[in-house]
Amino acid sequence: MSTKSEPDRIELLQGTLDLLILRMLLLGPLHGHALAKAIERNSEDVLQVEQGSLYPALHRLIKRGWISAEKGISENNRRAKFYRLTAKGRRQIVVETTRWDKLANAIARILRVTEQENRP
Amino acid sequence: MRWRSHLSDLTRDMQDHIEEEIRDNIARGLPPDEARYAALRKFGNMTRHREDTRAVWIQPLLEQFAQDARYGLRTLRRNPAFTLVAIITLALGIGMNTAVFSIVNTVLIEPLPYPDPQRLVWLAEWNERFKMEAVAGPDFIDWQKQAHSFEKIASYEYVDPVIEFGGNSDQHRAVEISPEFWSISGAHPALGKLFTAAGQDEIVLSYPFFERQFGHDPRVIGKLITLQGHPVTIVGVLPKTFRFVPPVAGFPGIEPKEIDAYIPSAVSPASQIRGRNMAILNVVAKLGPNVSIDAARTEMNAIQARIARQNPNGFYNLVQLRVQPLQERLMARDRRPLLVLLTAVSFVLLIACANMANLLLARAASRQKEIAIRAAIGAGRARLLRQFLAEGVLLSLLGGVAGLALARWAIALIIRLSPQAIPRLNEVHIDTQVLLFTLGLSLTTGILFGLSPAISFSKHELHDVLKEGGRTSSAAAAGGRVRAALVAIEMALAVILLISAGLMVKSFWRMNTHPAGFDPEKISVMKVSLSGRDYATLAAQATYMDRILDRAASVPGVTAVGIENAPVRGVIGVEGQPPFSPGQAPQATYYSVSAGYLRAIGMALQKGRWVTDNERNAVAVINESFARRVFGSNDPIGRRIRTPSPQDASMATIVGVVANLRYSKLDAEPEPETYLPYRRSPFLRSVDIVVRTIGDPAAIAPAVRKQISTVDSRHPVFGVKTLEQALSESIVPRRLNLFLLGSFAFAALFMALIGIYGVIAYSVTQRTHEIGVRMTLGAQRAGVVRIVLRDGLAIAFVGVIVGLIASFGLTRWMVSMLFDVQPVDLPTFAIVTSALMLTASLAMGIPALRAALVDPMIALRYE
């Protein structure tokens, strides 16, 4: 997550991390480190996330009942905690994604308008 | 707890995560050191992430509060002087409020100790002319017969019978009740049974009386004792928990007291005849299960109207029927003084709050730098506010605990000083409700004054603080204005309290101003009561009286002895004047007295002469009040008035007029009184002996008592006290009010003075630099003092003016607590104002002098 130079990185918006985690877990249960790697790979290192900040987010999601945690063995044969999407979490992805799309569209529209206005 | 399991492996999970990353990095070819470093950097601050994760589960606010509280506690420990002043202030404010609230809670809020208290009602006939509530016996009988709204109607009457048993003879407080009262009060006997019919020679004892006088001996049931010379049977004892609570109406001289015994009332249809023989009763009733008080009132009004139609003598035009919830009626008398006390004590709390706000503001000003730094390193405004709140609440809780201790002590003191002052006062205690009240009070005050420092800063001002290096800023100036306003409010509240207390003191002083010659501290009063066949005739009674008068007079140190028969009240009638129409005649109290009585009690003769012990004709002496009320400016000497004594053809010639003497009750207005020679009294069974002595009456009284008992040892003297004791007992409620209001006023004054001292002292400290400059430029020390005092006096002046204006409006609520003093009493107002300004100047004088003694050279260097 840190190979890009400073200006290219984007600070995460509040709540975005939650959506990213849910999205990654859609493919199957993951443990903490694997989850961090997955987010890194999929965002092509654009998104700047401190790996540690995954944990408060994970616990927030557990508390809401969108994911669950269970003990398991990692691919390196080590004990690890695996996070799994719950049925409730699955539904939530739809909700969150729709909301995100709406927000992104709205922002994009505003930006386009201002661009046009600024054109001489 | 769910969160515990979630958080249990958190640290290990995070460490595993980092190990994994290190392995990845090494696999990518980084040297081990760098691999570790990169992994740690990528993970971020592990402690913070762990805290954030914990915060997801644990109520973060609570945790922060605990942290704030810990920090606050440390701050308080570092400033012991501040903490001590704060806790004392709060303990005073909260403690006094807790004490008064527990009284109000018991007396006004707690329900009557009888079943279905909301169904109990008070029935009375309010007599507009005598300003008195009572029920005529025949009306009570008619109500009982005709009213259907009530389950039961009961009458009661307070009496003070002399009870004799086993050689003891003493006067006791008892009630004559109709048997219905037992079912209304839900009483069951602890021993024996309760009487079930009127007019029986039976008596039921209260538990304390049974315990005190009969040594807890169950064999008293069935025993005979002598009640007013008649033998009666003890049939039962009431349980310890039973209390007689109905109000005292009718005769204003009676104060609620512990009831010793219950006697069946003799009121019956046969004994009650309108216009001839009527008992004056108090009546309580219990509404039927589903009857509203309005329905009962409608029915009672109809019954009363019918009675009035059948008895067209004008009496019923003068009386007005009252049907009122009993609880409400019970409160009526005590409500006003208690509400006044409650208001007064809440003022004390307000002053305490203002003082605390002031202290915290001053401290916030001196902590500006600390606060600015905390803001600079990332504490939000809300976070800072919470810190102040935590400190405030912490202080107020500490103050609350101290206040609770103070309240416990104060309640014990009040009960010991004057247990009879307020009905049910001896039941006052600190219960859960009171504890909740105190907790609520502490939290509210803590939040109120805890928030106050927040007014004095905002974010951009904090920047200024850092730039200014801690010197006085605009923020401090704003804080200063708030503090000045707070002190002005404190002064205003203190003025109101001091004026209230001043009015009480003046009332007290008026009550205790005796006419010349009346020295209650030199007079003893004692009682003797005759019974039995030996004293069946008036002649025998009179001979006994003559002999005890001789004996008492022979005791060394006794200068005068007199006797006074138990007084009788009666309607005034004057020969040659048309009789007053029924119910409109003024009443007088008739005393039978001996010749020595005038000198013994110290009454002043205004006109004519006093009665002698062997009058040939029926004569009477009246008091000033009687003369003014009945004869106006005409000379009453030689006029003939009706007396309640049947033997003198009911007429007596007035031979003298005496000055009014407030004797039995200090706070009662003088009423019309008539004095008759005792030898012409119809009976002399029970008399007060008044003994005037040289020196301490308490020392001589035992000798007098012994001499009197030599006349007839079967009739011992009882109820010995000095007249001063008797008088001061009659004003116990007022004394309690005075004591409480006085303490509130002193606490208020004390706190207001601390407040004004604090503000001035603080401003002097803040202005030391400025004062140094002024002095260097040639300002005189006197000039410096003037500058400092000017500010303080302006604050005090504004406060006093506001307080005076408020007092003009508020003191009229106190009318019922005052005696012979107008609520707006200019001398009191003036004295309080000047005393307050004077003490305020003194409080300001200390810092002002300190300012004047500033050494300019040091002051200029002062940072």
Image (tube, rainbow, N blue to C red):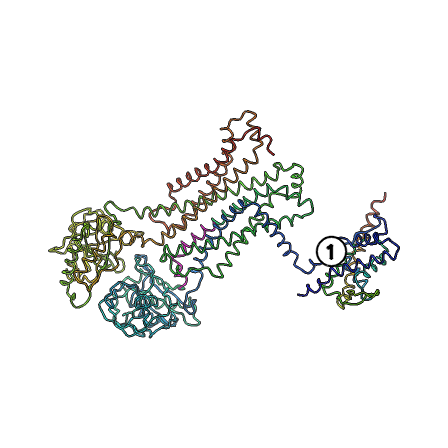
Q: Find residue B215 and report its horizontal and vertical position in percent.
A: 31, 68
Crowd tier of the residue under label 1, counting other residues whose Cα lies within 10 Å: few below 14, some 14–19, many 20 or above = many
Q: Quadrant of residue B299?
A: bottom left
Q: Which residues are magenta?
A: B326-347
| Residue receiving disc 1 | B49
Residue in the picture at 65% in, 41% down: B462
Tell me: B675 left or right of B729: left
* Res B200 visible: no
| Picture layout, residue A70 above or below residue B527 | below
**The numbered mark 1 sits on a residue in which chain?**
B
Does the magenta segment cover residue B95?
no
**Closest to the observer: B224 or A16?**
B224
Q: Quadrant location of the N terminus of chain A?
A: bottom right
The amino acid marked with disc number 1 is: His
Q: Find residue B767 and report its horizontal and vertical position in percent.
A: 56, 34
What residue occupies the far right of the structure in this picture? B29
Does the magenta segment cover residue B345?
yes
Give the secondary structure at mark 1. Answer: helix
